[in-house]
Amino acid sequence: MTVGTSGSTDSEGRGADGDPAASPGGGGRQSLRDRLNRWDVRYSPYLYIAPFFVIFAIVGLFPLLYTSYVSLFDWSLVADDPVFIGLDNYVALMGDARFWQAMVNTISIFILSTAPQLAMALLFAVLLDAHLRARTLFRVGLLLPYVASLVALGIIFGNLFNSEYGLINGLLGLVGIDPINWHSDRFASHVAIASMVNWRWAGYNALIILAAMQAIPRDLYEAATVDGAGRWRRFVSVTLPMLRPTMIFVVITATVGGLQIFTEPKLFAVVPGSNNGGSTGQFQTVTLFMYQQGFENFDLGYASATAWVLFLVIVIFALINFWLTRRISSTEGPR
Amino acid sequence: MLALPIGLTAALTLSACGGGGEDGDIELVVATFNEMGYEELLEEYEEANPGITVTHRKTGAAESHHQSLFTRINAGSGLADVEAVEEGYMAQAMEASGRFNDLAEIGPDDVSPDRWLDWKYEAGVTPDGKLIGYGTDIGPLAMCYRADLLEDAGLPSDPAEVGELFATWDSYFAAGDEFVAANQDSAWFDTGAQVFNAMHNQLETGYYDTDSNVVIESNTAIKDNWDQVVAAVEGGQSAGLEAFSPAWDTSFGDDAFATKTCPPWMLGQIEGLAGEDKVWRVAEGFPEGGGNWGGTWLTVPTQSDHPEEAAALAAWLTAPEQQTRAFVASGPFPSQVEALESDELLALTNEYFDVETGALYAEQAAAVGPAQFKGPRDGQIQTNVLTPALTSVEEGTASPDEAWDAVVSGAENLAG
C-alpha cells in the first residue's frame, strides 16, 4: 500500500516535470523514488497518528500548561493586569475550608457512585450474556439512560428528590418513613446525586464489559465444565480474570469521570443555575467549586490552582485504582 | 457561500451609488438576554437609518449572557457593539469600566441625565464619574399577597386597607406573627432571603463603602435586618422555599405562603404559577417606601468598531417612546421619567390582579430612594453568601449565629 502511494506521486511528478529536463534527471529520479520510499516507511506512520497529537496539543496540552501559568497569578476575568503571586493561590487553597469540604464531597459521591455502578454493570453484563430473546432490544435499552439528555435527567431527578413535593419522599411516606431532606442533608444529597450517576453510567459500562465477555474463548468454559466447575466457579476463575484489562479501563474512566463530576450536582441545586452546591456547600464538588471561582467570581488564578490540585488527585486515585484492580483480579487468576 | 459574493456586490454598488455622506454599510450587533422587547424596534431602526444593519444576538438566560460577556472582555474580542448588562452584574462591569465607552462623551448630545429616574441614572455611573450604561428597565417593588388567606386569618385583605400592614418592616413582621398565630398551615412569606434582599437594597450603604471596602461587620444596619428576618424565620413566618426552585414554583398554586415581594415582572410569573383559583392581589405600597429589584443597562464596549453609531442606537432604544413600546411588547418596566408619565403606561391594567398596574408601579418607582453603591462582589455576596446562609437557618442546618459567622467570613473571602 505504501509503495502504491509513493509510486503514484512519482508518476505524477514525472508528468509534471515534462520532457525538457528528462535526460539529466533520469538517474536522480530513481534515487529520489528510493528516498521517498524510505521516508514513507519511516515517517508516514507518524504522520498518520499526527492529527491526534496535534489536536491534543492544542486542546489538551496547551490548556494544561497555560492553566499552570495562570495559577501563579492573581488573575481576574475583568482586570487589566494580572499580578504575579507565585504559589499564593495554592497556599490559599490549602487553607480554604470550602475547598476541603468540596474535596470530601467529591470523594464521597465518587465512592457512592463508582462502586455500586461497576457492580451493577458487571451484573447486567452477566445477565445479558445469557441466551435471551430480543437480546439487542435489552442491550439498547441499557444504553438509553446514557443517550438521554442530561439536563432533562437533572430536572427529573431534582423533582423526584424534591423534599416538599417529591415522589421519593411520597413513596417513603407510604411505608411510614419520615420525609428525607434530600437537598439540605449532606449524606442524603450525596446519595441522590450518586443515584443519578449510577443510573446514567451503569448501562454504558455494562455494554463495554459485555463486549469483553463475549470475546472470551468459549472452549475455556468447556474445559472448566469438564473439570467439574460450576457456574459460580466458572465466573470467578474464568470470566473475571479474562475481564481484567477491560475492568482496568472501566475503573480508570469511572475514576476520572467520577472525580470530575459537575453536571449532576449543578443540576441538583435547588435554584437553577446555582454553583453553590446547597446552602452550606453540602454537595458542592471540586469541579463545581472551580467553576464558581472562575466564572462566577472571575478569579481565574484561583480556579486554575484548583484545577491543578484536582488533576493531581485524579492521577493519584487512578494509580491506586489501577493497582487495586490488578491485585484483586490476579489473586484469583488462572494458573 | 453564495450569499457572500452577492452581498459584497450589493454593498459595492450601494456605496458607489451613495456618494452622499455615508461611507458604506455599518453593521451593529446588539446582544441581549431574556425578553427585552426590541425585535420590532430594531427593524424599525434599520429602516429609519439606511446604511446601518442591526444584528440581534439573543441569549435566553442572564447567567450565560454575562458569562460570555466577561469572558469576551477578558479575551479582548467577540463582544457585540451594544451589550446589555443586568443589575446583578453591573458592579463587575464597573470594575472593568476601562473596557466600556463613556456614553456621556460619545453618545448623542440630546441625551441628558434627566431622561431617567435619578437613582437609575446614578447606578450607571462609575465612582469616577463615567457613564457606562443607558438604563433600560427597572423593577420597582410592591407587595403581592393572598387576599383569601389574609381574610381567613382575620387580617384586612382589600388593597386599600392592607396599606398599614405593609407600611413598615416592623408592621410587616408584626402582621406576620398575627397571621401565623391564626393560620398554622401557611407561612407569611416564601423565604427569608427574598425579604432580606428587599430590605437590604433600601439601605443607603450596602455590603461595601464607596471605597469598595467590605463593611458587613461595621454596617450595623445589615445585622439589624438580618436579626429581624431571622427572628421572623424562627417565629414560623417563612415557608423556607428557595426562590425560583421547583418547589417554590409549585408552592404558588398551594397555600404555602401569603405575601411576596413583587416587582412588575413577578406578576406574570405569579399568574402563570398560581392558576386561576388563587386570589393574589398587589398592595399599593411597600414597607418603608419603595425598593427596586432588577433592571438592565445598555453598554457600548470599547471593542466596538463603531462606538458612536452604537451609542446612538443604544440612546434611541432607551428613549422614553421606545422603552414604552418595549414595555407593551414584552413587559420590561421603563426607567425613563417621560415613559412613566405616558398615558399608554398609566392606562395599563392587569385583570388577574384586578389593578391598574402601570399607575401603581409608576408610583412605586418614584418612591425608590437613592442608588446604593454596589461594590465589585456585591452580587456574589448576595447570591452565594447571604442567601445560602439564610437558607441554612431555615433548613435548620446552621444556627443563626453560625450562619452569621458564615456570612462575615464568606463575604471577606469573596472580596479578598
Image (cartoon, helix red, strand yellow):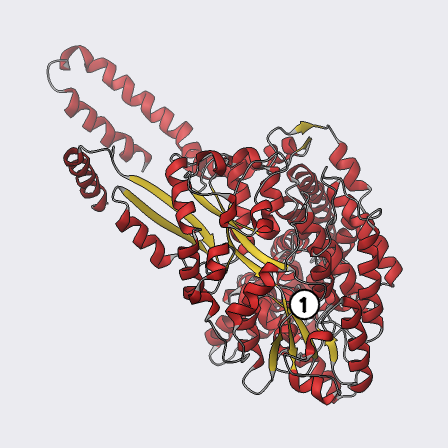
Q: Residue at x 47, y 65 (%)?
A: B331
Q: Residue furthest left?
A: A19
Q: Is residue A89 visible?
A: yes
Q: Residue at x 51, y 71 (%)?
A: A139
Residue B219 point in image, percent of width and height: 82, 49
Q: Residue at x 67, y 34 (%)?
A: A71
- When the figure is inspected, residue B199 is found, relative to residue A4, above or below; the finding is below
Occupied quadrant, residue B36: bottom left
Of B395 and A85, nearer the camera is B395
Q: Residue furthest top?
A: A24
Q: Residue at x 40, y 61 (%)?
A: B325
Quarter of the picture holding the N terminus of chain A: top left
Occupied quadrant, residue A275: bottom right
Q: Tell me the crowding category of disc 1: few under 14, some 14 to 19, or many 20 or more residues within 10 angstroms, Cα based.
A: many
Of B7 and B46, nearer the camera is B46
Tell me if B259 is positioned left or right of B322 in this view: right
Q: SS class of the residue under badge 1?
A: loop
Residue A323 point in image, percent of width and height: 73, 49
Tell me if A291 is positioned left or right of B191 in this view: left
Quarter of the picture holding the C terminus of chain A: bottom right
- Identify residue for label 1: B286
Instruction: Give the amino acid at mark 1.
Output: Phe
Residue A127 point in image, percent of width and height: 59, 75
Q: Which chain hosts label 1?
A: B
